[in-house]
Image: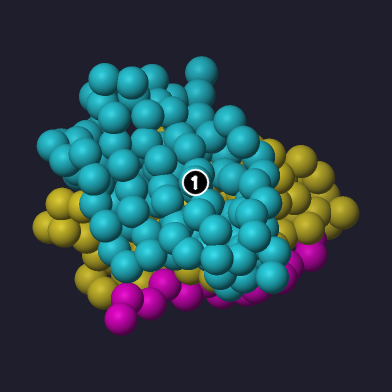
Amino acid sequence: DQQVKQNSPSLSVQEGRISILNCDYTNSMFDYFLWYKKYPAEGPTFLISISSIKDKNEDGRFTVFLNKSAKHLSLHIVPSQPGDSAVYFCAASEGGQGGSEKLVFGKGTKLTVNP
Amino acid sequence: DVKVTQSSRYLVKRTGEKVFLECVQDMDHENMFWYRQDPGLGLRLIYFSYDVKMKEKGDIPEGYSVSREKKERFSLILESASTNQTSMYLCASSLVALLTYEQYFGPGTRLTVT
């Protein structure tokens, strides 16, 4: 069963507008959440993260919001730029005990920002 | 900057061949991971290693094995390649002390099995 779900396979927005990418999770043991961005033929690159003790983390144009009671997080990109067009993966971790810091990834959302 | 390198960007192999995918990281990370990425399926963990000679199965280990003889190097082995192993393979590493669980990825190897 999928523990991390990104229900929108794709999203298209206009340049300058806000992009909102959503992610839901089912495992209440997750305590750290990350967003990765991936261009075609490249490896994913880390974008932003949030600990379960916070409800918001901001880094420039990127903000991640966490709603623990709803088991939901979202990534906001404001303003969106054509260079943001990529696949975005949501990932979650239960935290490391005994060296097991695995990440569970969602299936990704392809964002297209139109000029 | 952390650098994770993978031995090949593109690889074409025949069914039944033994295939070795190599990954090297230069930041003394304890953890290393192998994923495959397929359209509509996201990133799926094949194997990971948290120390030299230590390994654990991920979600889809069937048909694969791994080797970690040195801390910086993690190899993925396809014992007998099959067409359903055609995929993008991604290696990643992470530092235990970081406590943010951030993984650093290599550029990927696009493997085609014919």
Query: Does the magenta-highlighted stretch encompass residue B5?
Result: yes
Residue at 58% of width from left, 31% of height from top?
A: A7
Colour scheme in the image? by chain
Chain ID for yellow: B
The chain that appears cyan in the image is A
Q: Residues within 10 Å of mark 1 (few under 14, many from 20)?
A: some
- In the image, residue A70 lies at what x, y percent? 33, 21
- Give the SS element for disc 1: strand
**Image quarter of residue A36:** bottom left
Please indicate whether residue A66 sits to the left or right of residue A114 in the image: left
Q: Amino acid at mark 1?
A: Ile
For the question of whether residue B80 can be seen, the reply is no
Going 59% across and 45% down the picture, which residue do you hit? Answer: A109
Image check: B76 left or right of A65?
Answer: right
* Residue A31 vertical placement versus B7 (above, below): above
What residue appears at the point 52 percent right and 52 percent down from the top-left corner?
A19
> Does the magenta portion include B59?
no
Label 1, on which residue? A20
Residue A91: give x, y in percent of width and height: 40, 42
Quadrant placement of the C terminus of chain A: bottom right
Depth check: B11 or A90 in front?
A: A90
Stretch of the chain drawn in magenta = B1-13
The picture places residue B29, in percent across and down from the top left corner, at 25, 65
